[in-house]
Image (cartoon, helix red, strand yellow):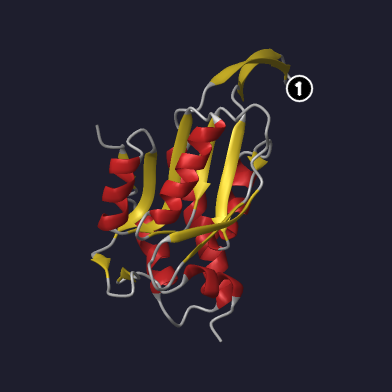
Amino acid sequence: MAAKLIVLDHPLVACHLTTLRDKHTPPSEFRQTIDRLATLLAFSATQDLATADAPIETPIQKMVGRRLLNRIGMIPILRAGIGMVDALLNMIPTAEVWHLGVYRDEATAQPIRYYDKLPAGAPVDVAFVLDPMLATGGSAILAGQMLQDWGVKKIKMLSIISAPEGIARMQEALPNVEIHTCAVDRGLNELKFIVPGLGDAGDRIFNTTG
C-alpha cells in the first residue's frame, strides 16, 4: 500500500509559494516564507497527534484541557531542513531536534550520509523529517530508513515542494511514511532539480548562491 500523500490546497500556500519561487525574492524574505509554509505544513501534519487530559485552573474556574501525549522528534536534513525547524518548534516547543547530514553526489545523484546524531536510547513516538525539497527522494528514504532502524513507529515527511519521481520512490521504499507537501511540481530535469521548482533551497536560505 502506497504512503499517504497530503498536498496542501490553500490560498495562503499558493501565495507564499509564489514568493518562494520568485528568483528576485531576497534571502531574508525567502527564509520568512519558508517559515510560514513550514508552519502551514506543521498544522497539516500534526492533526492526528495523541493528547491526554490536562486539569488546569483558569482565572475563573477549574477545567480540563489537553496536552500532547507523545514524544515528538524533528529530523531536519542538513542543510536546507534547518530552515524549517523554528516553525515547528514554535508549534511544538517540547519537541526534540536530531540532525541528519546528507548531500547528493552530483555524478550519481545518490545520497551520501556524512552526519547523524540519533541517540542510542529509546526512539521518539512520532518523527517529522524536514526538507524543503523532495526531489529524487534519496535523502528522504535514507532518513526514513534510519528512523525505522532506530525504532520509530510513526514517521512523516514534510517538504514544501515535491517531484512526482521522489514521491513515487518514497512510496515504494517507505509505504508507511506519510508525505505532506505544499506542491507537486512537474518533475525533475537532467540535473535532478525540481521543475519549475525554486532553485537550490539551501543556497537561497543561507545566501550562498555566489
Q: Quadrant of the N terminus?
A: top left
Tell me residue 6's x, y (percent): 32, 43
Q: Which quarter of the figure has residue 80? A: bottom right
Tell me residue 125's x, y (percent): 56, 27
Q: What's the residue at 42%, 73% (across, down)?
A: 106
Q: Is residue 113 above or below residue 200?
A: above
Q: Is disc 1 placed on a helix, strand or loop?
A: loop
**Extreme residue toward the bottom, this view:** 210
Asked whether residue 22 is in view, the answer is: yes
Most foreground residue, 205 or 120: 120
Q: Is residue 70 above or below residue 133?
A: above
Tell me residue 146's x, y (percent): 51, 41
Most foreground residue, 93 or 161: 161
Asked whether residue 43 is in view, the answer is: no
Q: Which quarter of the figure has residue 73? A: top right
Tell me if 180 is positioned left or right of 50 in this view.
Answer: left
Q: What's the residue at 53%, 74% (across, down)?
A: 203
Number of numbered discs overlaid on the protein picture: 1
Tell me if 26 is positioned left or right of 96 in this view.
Answer: left
Q: What's the residue at 76%, 22% (across, down)?
A: 59
Label 1 Cα crowd, 10 Å radius (few <14 / some 14-19 / many 20+): few
Q: Quadrant of the C terminus?
A: bottom right
Tell me if 88 is positioned left or right of 15 in this view.
Answer: right
Q: What's the residue at 40%, 77% (across, down)?
A: 22
Tell me residue 160's x, y (percent): 42, 57
Most foreground residue, 4 or 19: 4
Residue indicated by mark 1: 59
**What amino acid is at disc 1?**
Pro
Q: Which quarter of the figure has residue 20? A: bottom left
